[in-house]
Amino acid sequence: MDATEIGLWGVPLAILGGAIRVSTPFIFVSLGEAITERSGRINLGLEGTLVFGAMSAYAVAVMTGSPWLGLLAAAFAGLCFGLFHGWICKFPKVNDIAIGIALMLFGSGLAFFFGKPFIQPSAPDLPAIPFGAWSDIPQVQAALDVNVLFLIGAALAAFLWWAFRNTRAGLILRVVGDSSDAARAMGLNPNTVRLAATGVGGALAGIGGAYLSLYYPGSWTEGISSGQGLMAVALVIFARWNPLGCFAAALLFGGAGALGPALQSVGVTQGYYLFYAAPYILTLVIMIATSSPSRSLAGAPGELSITK
Amino acid sequence: MSATISKKAVGVETIGMTMRFGAFTALDDVSVKVSTGSFHALLGENGAGKSTLVKCMMGFYHPTSGDILVDGREVTIASPRDASALGLGMVYQHFTLVPSLTGAENLVISREKVPGVIDWRKERAALAQFMERMPFKLPLDVKVAELAAGEKQKLEIVKQLYLGRSFLVLDEPTSVLTPGEAQEVLGLVRAMTRAGDLTVLMISHKFHEVTAFADDVSVLRKGRLTGTGCVTDLDHRQMATMMIGDQPIAALDSRAEPKPDAEIVLKVKALKAPDRTGLKSIRIEDLDVRSGEIVGIAGISGNGQKEFLEVLAGQRPRDAGEVTVRGTAYAATRAEARALNVRLIPEEPMKNACAPKMTVAENISFRTFDIDGNGKPVSWISASAIRSFSARLVEQFKVKTASLSSPIASLSGGNVQRAVLARELTGEVDLLIVSNPCFGLDFSAVAEIRARIMKARNAGAAVLLMSEDLDELLELSDRIVVMSDGALVYETPIAQASVQTIGEHMAGHH
């Protein structure tokens, strides 16, 4: 068999590679949102945080020449957005969903405003580890070129899954998310815990944004996010607030996103545009399939405004 | 910190406790002595000051004047933290356990000092050792949401003991339990007080529990201590007098003799509807309610009674089955309810039977505002007719309201229920569906509301009464049906009803 002509095998391979490449921002945003929602609050503003994170990472990387400083800047910007959301939601009669939508538009708008000068210059990329170096086949090499952030994301998912059960912080987060009354009876302040959870969630979403601008697609444009931040919220619900579920769901979405380009690469010329919509169709199908008019979601944190 | 109950029971005494909120005196010079290792009951109506008193003990409120002695020494309790340091703990009426955490997780996280990373193997061993010394046997690895109410209540008590508390306030601990569970929990708690491990102050309004389990009793009325003493020296009548003073209590109408061949008004056949979670369904195979009888539905909350009522009220769609009233299919539309004289008194009347921000007059007129005296629809709604109609009913049902045009949300719970009764019991009533009508109301309102229901029955209405209060059902019903796990599992005429058997069926032990 010719090394460069692997025929239809290219499709699953490209989907695998795509899943790894495309899923990374989903992983970070959804893990961040899982932490926030487990504390009993929903932050829809993560889309804005993602875009602002992408911009700030790119800008700092261009100016300093270091992608890692860019990543830190994105995380810090995300943290600020998260804390801002958490701080506003502390006030009585504030609706976390409405604030989230406002912050989503605010974050994107601010990112476009500050990001104008950075559309042209190019920034250094985050490093990737070539796990496919053993193979001579370029497709295999391309698919297994795994960015370090993906590995960090996978480790983080496993860590969070463990931490929700086995650490004090994890248990406190679940207590606050499930019952404000019980938390107060234990002498915990739900607002403080939620503030911290929203802050961490924002920081993770910022890192997801940094991946977008510093690795894949790897440049700053205003259309850099195609709704990943919003879909990650849907994904958390689909994953039933379980970090490992978030990781798996992110891979699934990533794979669906890679379907279109993969079909195109093997020479399907008609209708592949339809497959570009796969992640969105998947979102819809999953939301419909997992919802019910009369049943509340199993595993949902009790204090979450959408499930109350 | 490893939890121990090495601390022996402590006694608590209040001296001249007074608590004022502005001009309102919630507690007036109350001195109660709960001696070490005793089981003390605290009786009183809603608003009598029971919870103010225990909140002062627990450090939630700071009394205007008065002292607290713990084990004979004067102490300052400025916060709940101080109270727990002294070994004082409280079990609330509503559970404070976190539903999605397991029992073990709930216990460990409620400790004051929790390590950053929890070593579950060590914790589990410590918990197993702790539980060996407990009279309660509980599964600790199951999510609290999956425990039965009795188990939750036990876990609440165990939690307090795990935290090293040796003086416990129990706030109406049996309100969510079956009679069997209540017996068991209180029996175990009493055994611990007997052994000298624990002192208990129990807030209650059930006289039979007080007589069966408590050593001493204190009674509060309107913020004052109206009586205290040994339970063995007092009978129910004396306790009731201390509790409610000398105000007259509405007496139940004597029960008119039921006619076994009276017309069947409500007939439910093979009804099927999804329950709250959507995972299970309720199935009512066959239920008849005849004219002039009260059929009581007993059951622990969450066994489908609420859903059954919602179906009958038109609040919940049904999957299958038929409901007929006087032989006519009934789907709970406004027109049908009017034509067939079906009336409804749902639980939580403010939520289910009122528009909170509309006025008392408007709320009372919901059933009649759009028809004239002859039952013909009117095209122009007369505000003055609404006012005079509701003024008459407010008078007749003794609804205490500042004015007819106050929003109904400004009324107290008992008066909201009176207003709803006024609306529902006026005019011809053929079928009356009632659910937990007296929940959270005080003594005199309860007596009055029960008397009204009995009166409607004697006037020939068929009454379907759902209640979580078994005493209420035993007092009012002609027949009792037990609902468990979404189905009617047991039926008994009142003459042969036994609390024991009903309780067993409620718990699903058959």
Image (cartoon, coloured by chain):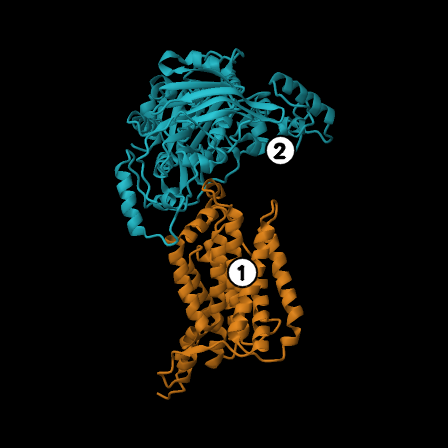
Q: CA distance from mark 2 to mark 1?
A: 39 Å
Element at label 1: helix
Chain A display color: orange
Horizontal and vertical percent for residue A47? 57, 63
Element at label 2: loop
Horizontal and vertical percent for residue B396? 62, 16
> What is the crowding at mark 1: few (fewer than 14 residues within 10 Å), some, or many (at least 20)?
many
CB under 8 Å between discs 2 and 1? no
Tag shown at residue B39 = none
Identity, as a three-letter code, of the amino acid under mark 2: Pro
Q: Quadrant of residue B211?
A: top left
Residue at 58% of width from left, 67% of height from top? A51
Horizontal and vertical percent for residue A135? 36, 83
Q: Can you say whether A135 is above or below B312 in the image? A: below
Residue linked to disc 1: A202
Residue at 73% of width from left, 27% of height from top? B382
Q: Can you say whether A274 is above or below A33 in the image? A: below
Q: Nearer the viewer, residue B270 or A204?
A: A204
Q: Can you say whether A149 is above or below B479 in the image? A: below
Furthest residue toward front: B73
Residue linked to disc 2: B356
Quarter holding the N terminus of chain A is bottom left
Chain B display color: cyan
Residue A226 at least partly seen: no
> What is the crowding at mark 2: few (fewer than 14 residues within 10 Å), some, or many (at least 20)?
some
Identity, as a three-letter code, of the amino acid under mark 1: Gly
